[in-house]
Image: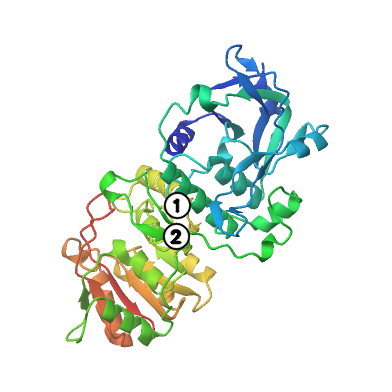
Amino acid sequence: MRNMINALANMAQGKFLMKCDAHCAFAKGFDEVLTKEIGKDWVVAPRRYSLNVDAWGIEDNGKIRDAHYLSYPAAFDVKGDYLGFGMHVKDWPERGNARKDFLIDEDMTSQGSCWVMHRDYFKPLCSIGYGTFIQEMQEIGLRAWLSGGKLMVNKKTWYAHLWKGKRFGRMYELSRQISKNGEVYSADYWNNNRSPERIHDLEWLVDKFWPVPTWDAGWKDVQLTFPKVMVQAPDLPEEDIMTTVQDVSPKVTATPKTRDEVVAHILKKFNIAKIESLPIDIDYNRSQWGKLFNELGYKKGAEIGVYAGEYSECLCRDNPGVEHYCVDQWMPFGAYKESKLIEAERLARENLAKYNCKILKMSSMDAVKQFADNSLDYVYIDGGHDFQNITNDIVEWEKKVRPGGIISGHDLDKHRFSTRCHVLQVVYAYTAATGAYPWFKTSQACRTFDTDGNRWTSWLWVKA
């Protein structure tokens, strides 16, 4: 479902997006009512009733669902043991009755079977962690509230949604294990304020709607420990799906901070007992560097030259929570024509929206001025490869990396196929002139994610 919502939203050409379940009935003119009074940063749902499937209208059960709350993210039994995790959407009739005169009202969350927003406000739903189906409204609603938007209910119109229950059943298969995993992932993500877009923490939202059922007054003082779950990435081909058990709150190993500690970590990782010549070959390709950066505790870095964002996504996916800056002008040059670059920029922004990525559409030398010296854990340089640009990038961006951080880049051996690529000459000269010791290059070309079967190796050293 999440992938289909993303795909259809990408295809949409209208001013608004609406998602609804198939088994819903609507009031006449509901679309005009919903779009007449809607803020640019609102997600809006109509008043909800139960569906009478035989009459295809409102079920006469007296239930009007105008308000909802998110349940506390962990349930306990009388012994204090956890029963389950997940912030679930629950009807909140007490709030609905108390605020019945507010015809357009704020709602903490919504049931998710119908929502409307401006098309430009939509951001792609994430499948990694959540899975393909559940927790849609938790992601949409919490993203809106915590990033400065609103989730609203418009009581001037209505829809009726089918409660399938035992009479109709789900009508399709859904793995309960995947659902439970998604519930744990979502609860951990939002309870621990992992969203890079937020300007508020979850505490702000709970306080805004306080008192909230199932949330005790001392909840802020409770440090929840979420269990290990099976995290899947259903967007990927089956052979690439990650099905190993991992913590939904990934922890890094003890963080080496000094240059000597980082070098020792790399030498040990690749079983290098003796340095005989430079650069040192390491049996790695750049698609694995996100994992290495995570091991080293690197949580802030920059990539110079992004194109469609494939490598940025790789670095962010394998280093959860990293603050990653993407620098690219997307300006035509050489074989990179304007039409290709427009599409590349669109893909980069779309694919990186679910990560803590900050895109800087500017030249490398303008972007480098945005950072204080010694403020980054790493930089990956893959911009202009001619002598002047690669020299400027290494000299200026190294200043922004802290001691113990990594300076790295791409296309060390591309000179063999292009007279305009001077990466090898500049890197060899710079390391010799500055005494960068030791420095490394990958012995494996990267073929893991680049659509063109990337053939070029990468290089790195640790700042003294």
Disc ID at residue 283: none
Name which residue type carries label 1.
Leu
The relative height of residue 50 versus residue 341 in the rendered view (above or below) is above
Q: Report which residue position mark 2 lands on.
A: 326
290 and 87: which is toward the camera: 87
Query: Residue 348, how many percent across, how many down?
Result: 42, 50
Query: Residue 2, how many percent across, how many down?
Result: 46, 39
Task: Choose mark 1 or mark 2, whichever is in front.
Answer: 1
Q: Residue at the location (70% across, 22% down)? A: 61
Residue furthest out toward the front = 79
Q: In the picture, residue 119 is in which quadrant?
A: top right
Query: Residue 206, how many percent across, how many down?
Result: 70, 53
Q: Whole-Å distance between the Cαs marked 1 and 2?
A: 10 Å
305 and 166: which is toward the camera: 166
Disc ID at residue 352: 1
444 and 370: which is toward the camera: 444
The relative height of residue 60 versus residue 402 in the rendered view (above or below) is above
- N-terminal-most mark, 1 or 2: 2
